[in-house]
């Protein structure tokens, strides 16, 4: 199912439709402030396993990232030092993934890695979805290095490619090609793991 949602003013009826899919353990592809990404309710373990299977990822060995609406309840999912919180507050919403130690409220599937990526994209569609769902959304970019750019930026082509694997593709306009900047904040000696769109 391809659903058109306008980033400037997301339509509540369409948002509710997508949220119902997420609540039922469905998978959704949506725009962010960087590339299009695939996601599910981050607290629904079966949905998380389904995404990992599609992406060929072993959740025990790979870092998983979640999208939060803002930083207000971030301590439920990650342990944040004062220095890390200050850094995140200054740069979010924005094109960054901050890697932090996991906290106790994340399902066990995240625990084996002991760290989690936190995203608060500067994109109304995905943040409105997270807010309406009431849970963070697990997120994995659909952009593969060897892939034709059009297939990861044009929502209609994305829909064509992933229609059988996901339940909804959101058309929020053309996506970008540059991923988020990944910053390791597991210690207060912050390091940039991947330089992407965001400038620290």
Image (cartoon, helix red, strand yellow):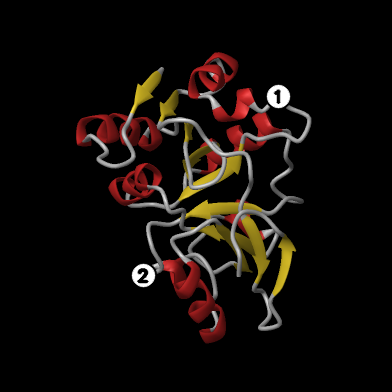
Residue tagged 1:
148
Instruction: Using the image, determine if residue 47 lies above or below residue 70.
Output: above
Residue 178: percent from the left, percent from the top?
63, 45
Q: CA distance from mark 2 to mark 1?
A: 38 Å
Q: Is residue 168 left or right of residue 161?
A: left
Q: Is residue 44 above or below residue 180?
A: above
Q: 138 or 197, which is in the foreground?
A: 197
Q: Residue 121 location, x and y as percent?
A: 46, 53
State whether residue 78 is above or below residue 171. below
**Residue 165: image location, x then y, percent:** 57, 21
Q: Secondary structure at mark 2?
A: loop
Helix or strand or loop: what does disc 1 sit on? loop
Image quadrant holding the C terminus, namely bottom right
Q: Is residue 158 above or below residue 43?
A: above
How packed mark 2 is, by other alpha carbons closer than 10 Å (few <14, some 14-19, many 20 or more), is few
Q: Which residue is mark 2?
A: 72
Using residue 193 as the reference point, say whether residue 136 is left or right of it. left
Tag nearer the camera, 2 or 1: 1
């Amino acid at each position: 199912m391809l659903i058109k949602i306008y980033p400037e003013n997301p339509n509540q009826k369409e948002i509710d439709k997508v949220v119902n899919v997420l609540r039922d353990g469905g998978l959704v592809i949506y725009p962010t402030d960087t590339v299009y990404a695939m996601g599910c309710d981050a607290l629904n373990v079966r949905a998380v396993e389904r995404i990992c299977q599609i992406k060929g990822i072993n959740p025990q060995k790979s870092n998983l990232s979640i999208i939060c609406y803002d930083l207000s309840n971030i301590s439920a999912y990650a342990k944040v030092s004062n220095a890390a919180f200050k850094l995140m507050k200054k740069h979010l919403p924005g094109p960054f993934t901050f890697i932090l130690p996991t906290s106790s409220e994340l399902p066990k599937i995240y625990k084996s890695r002991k760290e989690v990526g936190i995203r608060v994209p500067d994109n109304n569609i995905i943040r409105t979805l997270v807010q309406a769902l009431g849970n963070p959304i697990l997120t994995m970019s659909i952009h593969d290095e060897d892939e034709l750019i059009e297939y990861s930026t044009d929502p209609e082509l994305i829909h064509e490619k992933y229609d059988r694997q996901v339940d909804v593709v959101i058309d929020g306009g053309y996506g970008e090609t540059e991923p988020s900047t990944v910053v390791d904040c597991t210690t207060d000696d912050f390091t940039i793991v991947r330089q992407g769109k965001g400038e620290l």
